[in-house]
Amino acid sequence: METIRLGNAATLDDQVFNSLVKKVTDILKLEILQELQVRSQPTVFKMKKGASKAGTAVANRIAKMPANRKAAFETRVKTTNLMAPELHSFAVLKGVDLRATKIASAQLNLKSEFAFVNTTFNEAYYQKFTEKYLGVQLLGNVGGALVNKSLRFNVHSVKCVDETNPEWPGSDEIAMGGVALDDAKKESIISEVFVGGGFDDGDVKSYNPAKTIKQFAFTSAGTFPKSFAVFLALSEKDGGGFASFIKDLYDAIKDKLQLVFTAVGGAIGTAVGAAIGGTVGGPIGIVVGAAVGFILGALVEWIVGLIQDDTFAPQVAIVEFGSINATFNGSTNSPIQTLNYIDHGGHYQLRYSWQIAS
């Protein structure tokens, strides 16, 4: 089927999917807090330092913060309850003790906690989910004998709809970067690109020609459909390293999802585990990619508030190819799409497109 589908949904009306995202996100939040507390107060918090991959990523991010912000956070860790009421209620309800030697996920019966996916996750669900998530466009072919060899993710512009707070004095300085996932489910860092400084309400940084920030190679091996994904974050006044931070969190989320579905077991656990590991694509791969993206966005949004970071939560752009010959209605360029970044009292819009090279 020589079609291409595009997706960048920021929300989804899917109770089971949202429950999966919420519960995994909450578990990761608890483990991040465990890691930060054990580094700050090792005589009180007993988990082994470094046990939380996500927590280690956040600790490394804090280490790169300016000295005054780092000191302020260290004081908060020792004097303030960092758990919001909802997260505290989750921990109490599930019997999770952050002072215990076991990491939070090891204190839970994951098979029982995530049993709800067993009654929903199947081929019909994966297909229906993909239709919703990639419902932006269904583009016909006219691919013919052309063989797609590479794919570019191009940025056309970054617009400041509303400057971050405080809006005066000073203007925003913005960089972009993140993680890319190719058709073999191999991830790589999208190196940080400085977009520009002096952003005030209504200012736009345009790229003409469009700026390629990631190029993928097509692999003809394996079955179609195949998908590519970009998890792209913006950061204000960044001191460097936020793309690596996003990549580290991405890896931690993948590992946690793998742990969850290994515990779930059975055919569902095996199938989803294979998709997480990159050996299975198609609709189930779209579900996994969307789950990682939504968890990543929710986690970064929470971390930003926790450590007073200047990063906007990553947004996800996905493209699915039905065959090696598929084109965008006969064109090598997709329609231009928009990602919205809303946080820190500000709003930015990034316009992008996909481009095929044969």
Image: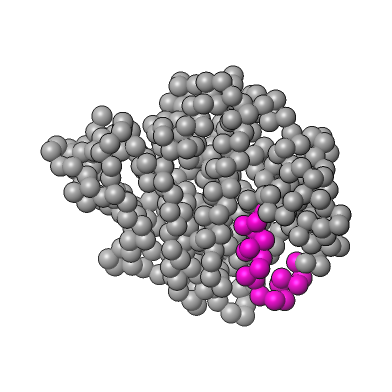
User: Left or right of 200: which side holds 338?
Assistant: left
Give the magenta part as a residue range. Answer: 55-73
Q: Nearer the viewer, residue 354 or 73?
A: 73
Task: Locate residue 185, reporting x and y percent.
Answer: 41, 42
Main secondary-structure element of the magenta-colored stretch: helix
Q: Residue at x 70, y 76 (%)?
A: 67
Q: Residue at x 45, y 74 (%)?
A: 196
Q: Residue at x 77, y 70 (%)?
A: 72
Q: Is residue 60 magenta?
A: yes
Task: Locate residue 80, reporting x and y percent.
Answer: 84, 59
- Residue 229 appearing in the image: no
Q: Quadrant of the N terminus?
A: top left
Q: Nearer the viewer, residue 258 or 121?
A: 258
**Does residue 64 sit above or below 1 in this rendering?**
below
- Residue 116 appearing in the image: yes
**Does residue 123 sit above or below 348 in this rendering?**
above
Q: Nearer the viewer, residue 262 or 305?
A: 262
**Does residue 281 sit above or below 204 in this rendering?**
above
